[in-house]
Image: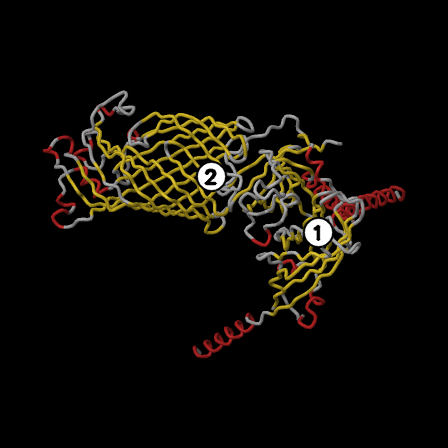
Amino acid sequence: MKLKFLSIALAAITLFSACNSSDQATEITVSDTFTLEGPLFEGSNPAQLIYPVDIKTLLGDKYHEGVKITDATLASATISSLDSNSLSGITSMVLSVASDNPELKMLELGVINPIKEGSTNAALNPSAEANAGKYFQEKQYYIILDVALAQDLDDNLALKADIKFNLKHN
Amino acid sequence: MKKILFIAFAAFFGTILSSFVNQDAAGDRLIGVWEPSNGRARVKVEKIGAKYYGKIVWLKEAVDPVTKQPKTDKNNPDPNLQNAPLKGYRMLKDFVYAGKDEWTEGTIYDPLNGSTYSCTIKMTDKNSLEIRGYIGVSALGRTDIWKRLEVKKK
Amino acid sequence: MKLFNLHKQAAIAACFAFALTNLAKAQSDTTKSPETETTAEDEDFSMYDEVGFADKGAKRYCSPKIEGLSPAKLISLGFDFQGPYKLNLDTFNNNINEGWAENNKHTTTSGARFACNIPVISKTSVVWQMGANYWESGYQMMQQGPLAVGYVENPMLKSLYTNGLRTMGINTTLFKPLSDKKFLLFQGSADMSGDYNWKLMPARYMKYSAALIYGKRPSERKQWGVGLARTYRAGELNYIPIIFFNHTDAANKWGSEVLFPARAHVRRTINSRNMLFAGYELEGQSYRLYRMESIRNQDLEIRRAEIRLRAVYEFSLKDFIWMSVQAGYRINYRYDVDRLTNGKEIYRAFGLLSDEPYIMQNTLTNPFYFNVSVNLVSP
């Protein structure tokens, strides 16, 4: 009886360990456009989009019933202008995520400051610590881009964003 | 009897729906521009989704005396985020209206030392807020009175 | 009846319509279609240069802190160690029959230190804190054998080695800003110091100290003040002027934290979570010799004061848990004994008002010391 119990316990521990050690990593890219409608003013101008989380599409072949994303760190975020070739007039950008869930706090994911004059795209410096894993367990969340302008701008501003996340999931 | 029940249900349902509307309107009273008691910054509160956030829109000392550049979040514990400009930085985050003139579940960030504190906001009158930042328990904290500002039209 | 029923149904429908319309309106403010968009109101940050209070009676108040200051300790638990040094005691009570002079007693002194300062009211218009502290000073004799404690004749020395000294007290601090640049600072304390045990001593042996400062805070990096204190820091009762000065340089690298003559330090800020200090602190109290029944009624008090020259390193272990490590040189300022006549405090005013001699004049050599503490610091 004792031996039987020990065997079952051992098998359970082995199985549990095996399950835990099978965390997988997947890189996903969120590509979208932030449009800031003019007139825009000197200083910080925020733009946001609602990102619906579709785990099946995100993980593709790696999707399975009961899959859970535990970690999501920003691998890279590149912002480029759609309207003209350069990002002139933009001094800095901050990328953040936010959620309506009271338990999820806003996270700054990346920053670039300053942006070199004449740059055609800007690669944000990803946060060393921010982990947006729990955001990917929500049905949707907000992605916010704060764009700081050096001067007032009468026109609209359209910015293309390619945001890469490193996901860890079971 | 059936009709009475139906009317009662309709009235109840209408009240519930209306209360959500009223709750939103009550929470939105936080939106506006506010000044902490020391007058060193001005913070604009706005809504993202269902939560309230406050960003710095004015600083008494906007330029770093050493670098001569606009101040950045140089005390952020995350070294990769230390270049974020302070003007436009959201120092109040994630507040949810809890009813009875209180907003809770939020945090307040102190750019002077890079520390984030749990925080509650209580509106004592339409132009005054008690902003209480604390560590762990509310007793270990400090309350600051913020006053609403009116932007003078140019 | 039919018409009435129709009216009722119409009213119900209207309620539904109203509620649903409001709900839709509320939802449209918060739920956005999956498209990118700006916030509802673009803003010109320069408009925030010209503002006024919505409430015309609103005031600004100065903060009790300045930029770059070391964090205030809410709760502190530490350990203090001095030594080894030599203790040289006079004949007890100026009476050779009551105990021999004791010389060259190799001694170390060590003990735990606890302090807390909890905000009672913490608002911009007033800050009021209450605190408590407990410091233990155990005396350890380093010699053994014929020079060990059992052979000590001097009652004071015997008490020091057997019972040690301790001080415990409560204190209150009140910071009242008068405007955005001026403030008042008051601190008061009641301390019980002696060789008592858990049974304590009667409350009439408590010592009371207080300080009042009028100060100015002309900028975010400087605050200063002048005031008056009733204090036992020099070992006996004194009334002295005090100077308060805190400042931080523009680069937030160097600063000073001064409350003269109690303490003064230069501060070097490595970053907001690591700070170095160099300076001194004057520590002292009047300790009643109470424990031994044979001498209890003689109203004897040790006037103990020491100057600690030190370097201090304070750093954040995690978030608001900080550690402080001090090392330095303890200079004995006074370790004499008074007998209080009819229990009355002797106020010498540094010899200006009274030159009544001490009944024991003792000397201690000066050792190195260290102090380590873990602290919960204030936001």
Q: Quadrant of the C terminus of chain B?
A: top right
- Looking at the rendered structure, the kind of residue marked 2 is Gly
Q: Indicate the chain on which mark 1 is placed.
A: A
Where residue A97 appears, x then y in whole percent?
Answer: 66, 54
Residue for point 30% across, 27% down: C237
Residue beneath disc 1: A117
> Looking at the image, which residue sits at the far left?
C97
Residue nearest the observer in this picture, C191 or A72 = A72
* Residue A124 visible to an observer of this rendering: yes
- x, y percent for residue A151: 74, 43
* Secondary structure type for disc 1: loop
The quadrant holding residue B117 is: top right
Residues at circles 2 and 1 in contact by the CB criterion of under 8 Å: no
Q: Which mark is residue A24?
A: none
Looking at the picture, do discs 2 and 1 lie on one chain?
no
Chain letter of disc 2?
Answer: C
